[in-house]
Image (cartoon, rainbow, N blue to C red):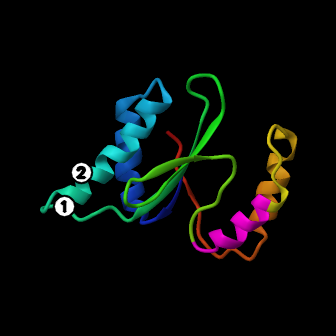
Amino acid sequence: MLSSGLAGDAHVVAAGVKKAAPKTVDELLDAIVHPMWEHGARRDLRPLGVGFIVASTLGGDPRLFGVDPSAAYWEMDAGAIGLGHEAATAFLEKRYRRGVAREAETLALGALGTKMRSQVVVIKT
């Protein structure tokens, strides 16, 4: 999980994911979006200000998802999050080729070099 937004809010979500110990991609996504929905729906909690890119091999196949602060999520082949994501996404869309995993590191470093000025927080779960 990579987050963009408030680091404390990312920690709230990551702690819930760790506690849930998901075994499938659906369980993983549910563990991520449930606290985000709860914080958005309850009057005594403020909405969480964080979005995620989530990579998973649960279920065998590698999959990548984006999750925005509203808890909407979508599957994607390649993507970026945070300030400067437009330039990084354009870079990836232009150069990404499905099924060529060897190029992933080079593409990721190239996307970071597209004048993105965001801070990236990596959460290990």
Name the secondary structure under disc 2. Answer: helix
Give the camera-side residue of 44 and 100.
100
Residue at 60% x, 72% y is 118
In the rendered structure, does residue 5 fall within the stretch colored magenta?
no
For marks 1 and 2, the one nearer the N-term is 2
Report crowding for label 1: few under 14, some 14 to 19, many 20 or more residues within 10 A (C-alpha).
Answer: few
Q: Mainly helix, strand or loop, the magenta region?
A: helix
Give me the residue at 45% from left, 59% from top. Answer: 68
- Where in the figure is residue 88, as x and y percent of width and height? 71, 67
Disc 1 secondary structure class: loop
- In the rendered view, tell whether residue 106 sits above or below residue 20: below
Q: Is residue 50 left or right of residue 106?
A: left
Say above or below: 28 vs 38.
above
Does 89 appear in magenta? Answer: yes
Residue 38: image x %, image y %? Answer: 23, 51
Which of discs 1 and 2 lies nearer the camera? The answer is 2
**Bounds of the magenta segment:** 83-93
Q: Are marks 1 and 2 in contact (CB under 8 Å)?
A: yes
Q: Is residue 100 left or right of residue 28?
A: right
Q: CA distance from mark 1 to mark 2?
A: 8 Å
The image quarter in which residue 92 lies? bottom right
> Which residue does the image show at 46% across and 23% down from the upper left?
23
The x and y percentages for residue 110 are: 82, 63
In the image: residue 84, left or right of residue 94: left
Q: Which residue is mark 2?
A: 38
Image position of 27 (left or right of 1)? left
Give, as a three-letter code, the residue at label 2: Glu
Amino acid type at mark 1: Leu
The residue under label 1 is 45
Q: How many numbered tags mark residues here?
A: 2
Q: Residues within 10 Å of mark 2 (few under 14, many from 20)?
A: some
